[in-house]
Image: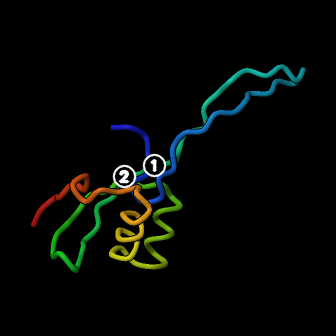
Amino acid sequence: MSKVCQITGKKASVGNNVSHSKRRTKRKFEVNLHTKKFYWVEQDMWIQLRLSTRALRTINKIGLNAALKKAEADGNLDFKDITIVSL
């Protein structure tokens, strides 16, 4: 599984390590991902998502169902990619 947030679509970006002498070498900035379980009230089931911390804040703000619908509309999430933990 790639390191991509299922809600926001964030993925690793590329930048430079800059030393004290200002030499630059390429590096990766990884996304701060967490695997989190949520209870999806509308579907009456537990699901598991791989989220960035920004997505956790989004879910707290607008709710899980609205965040999932927005992610699907933006093309970041396909409902077949959601892991169902238990029914």
Q: Secondary structure at mark 2?
A: strand
Which residue lies at the image location 45% right of the left edge and 79% below the top edge? 62
Q: Position of residue 49 (x, y in %)?
A: 32, 56
44 displayed left or right of 70: left
Q: Please, is residue 41 above or below residue 11 in the view?
A: below
32 displayed left or right of 38: right
Q: Which amino acid is tagged 1?
A: Leu
**Number of numbered tags placed on the structure image:** 2
Q: Position of residue 35 (x, y in %)?
A: 35, 52
Q: Which amino acid is tagged 2?
A: Arg
Which residue lies at the image location 74% right of the left edge and 27% below the top edge? 17
Q: Residue furthest left?
A: 87
Which residue lies at the image location 39% right of the left edge and 54% below the top edge? 6
Residue corresponding to mark 2: 50
Q: Secondary structure at mark 1?
A: strand
Which residue lies at the image location 25% right of the left edge and 60% below the top edge? 79
Q: Position of residue 55 (x, y in %)?
A: 47, 62
Asked if labels 1 and 2 touch by Cβ distance under 8 angstroms, the answer is yes
Q: CA distance from mark 2 to mark 1?
A: 6 Å
Q: Residues within 10 Å of mark 1 (few under 14, many from 20)?
A: many
Q: Residues within 10 Å of mark 2 (few under 14, many from 20)?
A: some
> What quarter of the picture does the N terminus occupy?
top left
Residue corresponding to mark 1: 33
Scheme of colours in the image = rainbow
User: Between disc 2 and disc 1, whose residue precedes?
Assistant: 1
Q: Please, is residue 2 above or below residue 38 in the view?
A: above
> What quarter of the picture does the C terminus occupy?
bottom left
Q: Of 48 and 67, which appears nearest the observer?
A: 67
Would you identify the image quadrant in which residue 38 lies? bottom left
